[in-house]
Image (cartoon, helix red, strand yellow):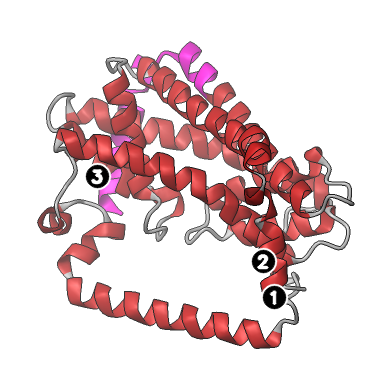
Amino acid sequence: MGQVLHAIRVFFEQLAAVDFAPLALAVGIHLVKTFCTSRAWRNAIAAAYPDRAVPQRSIYGAYIAAVGVNAVVPARGGDAVKLYLAHRSVDGASYATLAATLFVLSLFDIAMGGLIFGYALTLGVLPGVGALPHLAAFDFGWVGAYPELAIVLALVLAILVFFGGTWLRFRVHGLKARLAQGVVVLRDRERYLRTVATWQACDWALRFVAIWFFLDAFGIAQSVRNVLLVQVTQSLATLVPVSPGGIGTEQAFIVYVFDGAVSTTRLLSFSVGMKLTLVAANVAAGFTAIFLMLGHVRWREAAAGRPAPGG
């Protein structure tokens, strides 16, 4: 926490040097990016339910609501809100099928993430396991400091997932069929590429463009290399979603991967400034969506009131 507060203090000390014109452009591009992802999700749901109306406005509201909640709540708590709101918007939809459509989206993201990590590996900028305990990031630091505990927790999680899946399989009637329904768009390669992958490709392209303008706003050299390094740090920060939005972890990684190419002060100002700007935009858009869809912003009640998966 001390490292996070220090980074935030550095950002406010450097606030006068921020160029707000490219900053505003970056935020606008980020919001357009979220629409692209929601469009891909809506199309995956529409393929699963070809005989039902799947309103784009409602699916976008569900998606941006989750983005807002995830910005301030650890462990991706907003995903429950996303499924709840989507379930309300599609008549007769099941949670199992909706969850499976999110798996469809994850395939493209995993592929893109792998390509970017591969590029970072060729540069030799990623920290090894031995460096993790020395990073000022709780999310990963404890993994490096206590590898045996991390392994035990991973095994426990795997066991819980296995038995949880087995329990659901016998408890929820037709679970396998509902999950298969959610990934039906993958059976039609042309439709998947045209209606899902294309929109996700737009999402990733806009991610890079937004980072490009964020770099400009904070006076850091704009280059393809720097854009990809920033994206790597953002992806690493979401691997272990312990802190809200990966705050702290992202700042620790960005200082490491740039390795003196940019001053630490400027890097912290950039990383925290970008993070706080996106958090503010996500929270404002997300909780506005929750209010418009539910008439209140008590997202915890919405998440807690959802039926069991498969319902």
Which residue bears the numbered disc 1? 175
Q: Quadrant of the N terminus?
A: bottom left
Name which residue type carries label 3: Ala
Q: CA distance from mark 1 to mark 3?
A: 41 Å
- Is label 3 in a helix, a strand or a loop? helix
The segment highlighted magenta reads 1-26
Three-letter amino acid code at the position of disc 1: Leu
Q: Is residue 10 magenta?
A: yes
Q: Viewed as shown, does residue 193 lie left or right of 223?
A: right
Q: Position of residue 285 (x, y in %)?
A: 66, 37
**Residue 78 picture quarter:** bottom right
Q: Is residue 12 left or right of residue 108?
A: left
Relative horizontal placement of residue 243, taking residue 141 as reference (left or right):
right
Provide residue 50's location: percent of width, then percent of height: 84, 49
**Residue depicted at 18% across the width and 71% down the height:** 146
| Residue in the picture at 39% in, 42% down | 113
Q: Which residue is mark 2?
A: 179
Image x and y of residue 172, in percent: 71, 82
